[in-house]
Image: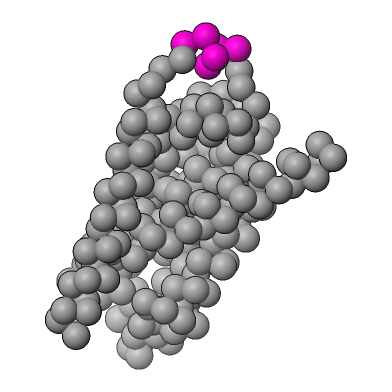
Amino acid sequence: MRKTGSTTVTLTLAALFSALAFLTVFILRIPFVPAVGFLKYEAKDAVLALEALILGPVPAVMSSVVISLVEMITISDTGIIGAVMNILSSCAFILPVGLIYMRKRNISGAVIGLICSIVSETAVMLLWNYLISPLYMGISREAITELLIPGFLPFNAVKSTLNAAVTFLLYKPIMTVLRKAGLLPKREADSAKGSVVAPIVINMICVLLIAFAIYKLISGNVTG
């Protein structure tokens, strides 16, 4: 029974993280390089990295695949190539922090993992942008090479750094909320402190996300 309950909680949390990750893509896509329209900042990987820290890298990778496919058929205009690039980018970010934190479950493990995630995503996406972007953009590989340093490199470095910072700032508050909700086992230190700040912060973030989503839907219907 305990194993069944644990599996149910894991699936529930994975679904929650997936929904939140997709919601961040839906409401927040900031263009980064005007010359390359598909390079947009999204906070999706921060949510997936939180899932990797809390549930492990495997559920987070599965969520990244599902979200990318749903994004492809709903709000994305980059097709299957964009979905593949999204999966590669997310996995390059969430796998290092998830795997490292599995072995070193403390603050230093999280920090080291996030630093490795920044380096991993930046390096991996330079390679894949070099290999795949010519197929999507319809230009030569030589032209893509000219964009790697001034365009793709800073984009992936800044994007992964921002997501790492968001992950680091939200990890403890979210863990506190999940423990208070009984979805994760409590630690003695957490039960002793009993802080109410974290639940308030998380609830405010969720309310703002939902409000933005409603606004987007309403404004889209009005302009359409």
Q: Does the magenta segment cover residue 86?
A: no
The residue at the point 35 percent across, 23 percent down is 197
Give how far across and how far down residue 38 sits, in percent. Answer: 31, 74
Residue sticking out furthest to the left: 223
Give how far across and how far down residue 172 sits, in percent. Answer: 46, 28
Answer left or right for 35 relative to 15: left
Whether residue 96 is visible here, answered yes or no, is no
Q: Does the magenta segment cover residue 191?
A: yes
The C terminus, quarter of image: bottom left
The residue at the point 48 percent across, 58 percent down is 19
Region in magenta = 188-193
Give how far across and how far down residue 170 sits, in percent. Answer: 40, 35
Whether residue 193 is visible here, answered yes or no, is yes
Answer left or right for 214 relative to 19: left
The N terminus, quarter of image: top right
Looking at the magenta stretch, what is its main secondary structure? helix
The residue at the point 22 percent across, 79 percent down is 221
Residue sticking out furthest to the right: 1
**Foreground residue, 26 or 9?**
9
Residue sticking out furthest to the bottom: 138
